[in-house]
Image: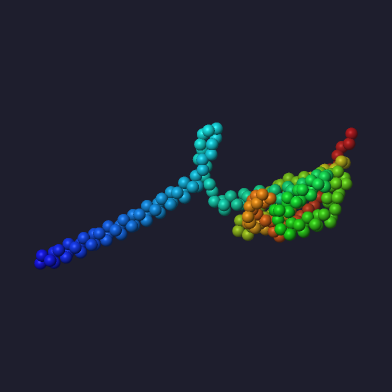
């Protein structure tokens, strides 16, 4: 009888010890999980200084900002591609920068514009081509964009206003000095490029 009581106490002690050990392991795991969650939240917090006053700024995921980056990329490309001063070196420089932002479809469009003689006309007539972005639509799922812009071709005696609509796909890639958004324009094509107004300048 006495031995049986001792055995029962030993069993109870083993169960209590085992339960305590398992409980300790579970508590440690929970603490580690909670700590990792808090660390992740902390990493997303950035403090910036505004006149020596720290202000909390939060990091956001790549996807949350990607559409904005896509729009900025498309806008930058069109500014480089369609802004044409009467200077062949500047045109070459702008086109070279634009080529880093797209694939061979962009180069094909450049060849098409060149063959139509636009660059030569700009230089020979001392014209200035500028483009203003009207709107850019991005499809987040297919990464397709449609660009709407108004081009202004200013000559000595006239101003030509043209409407430009282009489309293409956007592919993510590595960020580089020449491609800071890490985006490549593919399947680029011009849907519309027509004159909507031709104004004569007043010559006094």
The answer to whether 128 appears left or right of 44 in the picture is right
Of residues 7 and 181, the one drawn nearer to the viewer in this rendering: 7
| Residue plotted at (86% across, 49% down) | 121
Tell me where residue 2 appears, x and y as whole percent: 10, 65
Q: How many labels does the image show?
A: 0
Q: Which residue lies furthest to the left in this view?
A: 1
Tell me where residue 80 appears, x and y as whole percent: 74, 48
What is the quadrant of the C terminus in the image?
Answer: top right
Q: Can residue 204 be seen in this view?
A: yes
Q: Which residue lies furthest to the right in this view?
A: 204
Tell me where residue 100 appears, x and y as whole percent: 71, 53
Q: Quadrant of residue 159?
A: top right
Of residues 97 and 170, the one drawn nearer to the viewer in this rendering: 97
The answer to whether 203 appears left or right of 56 in the picture is right
Tell me where residue 11 appears, x and y as whole percent: 20, 64
Q: Can residue 160 be seen in this view?
A: no
How are the colours assigned in the image? Answer: rainbow
Q: Is residue 71 above or below residue 47?
A: below
Q: In which quarter of the image is residue 15?
A: bottom left
Q: Residue furthest top?
A: 51
What is the quadrant of the N terminus in the image?
Answer: bottom left
| Residue plotted at (47% across, 50% down) | 40
| Residue plotted at (71% across, 47% down) | 133
Of residues 164 and 88, the one drawn nearer to the viewer in this rendering: 88
| Residue plotted at (69% across, 59% down) | 186
């Amino acid at each position: 009888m006495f031995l049986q009581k001792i055995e029962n106490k030993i069993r109870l002690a083993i169960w209590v010890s085992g339960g305590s050990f398992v409980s300790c392991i579970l508590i440690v795991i929970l603490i580690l999980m909670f700590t990792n969650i808090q660390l992740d939240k902390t990493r997303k917090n950035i403090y910036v200084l505004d006149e020596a006053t720290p202000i909390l700024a939060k990091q956001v995921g790549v996807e949350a900002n990607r559409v904005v980056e896509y729009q900025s990329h498309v806008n930058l490309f069109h500014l480089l591609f369609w802004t044409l001063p009467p200077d062949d070196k500047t045109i070459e420089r702008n086109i070279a920068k634009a080529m880093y932002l797209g694939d061979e479809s962009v180069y094909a469009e450049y060849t098409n514009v060149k063959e139509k003689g636009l660059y030569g006309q700009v230089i020979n007539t001392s014209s200035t081509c500028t483009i203003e972005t009207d709107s850019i639509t991005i499809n987040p799922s297919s990464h397709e964009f449609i660009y709407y812009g108004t081009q202004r071709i200013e000559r000595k005696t006239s101003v030509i206003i043209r409407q430009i609509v282009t489309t293409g796909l956007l592919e993510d890639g590595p960020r580089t000095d020449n491609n800071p958004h890490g985006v490549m324009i593919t399947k680029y094509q011009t849907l519309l490029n027509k004159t909507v107004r031709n104004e004569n300048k007043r010559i006094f």
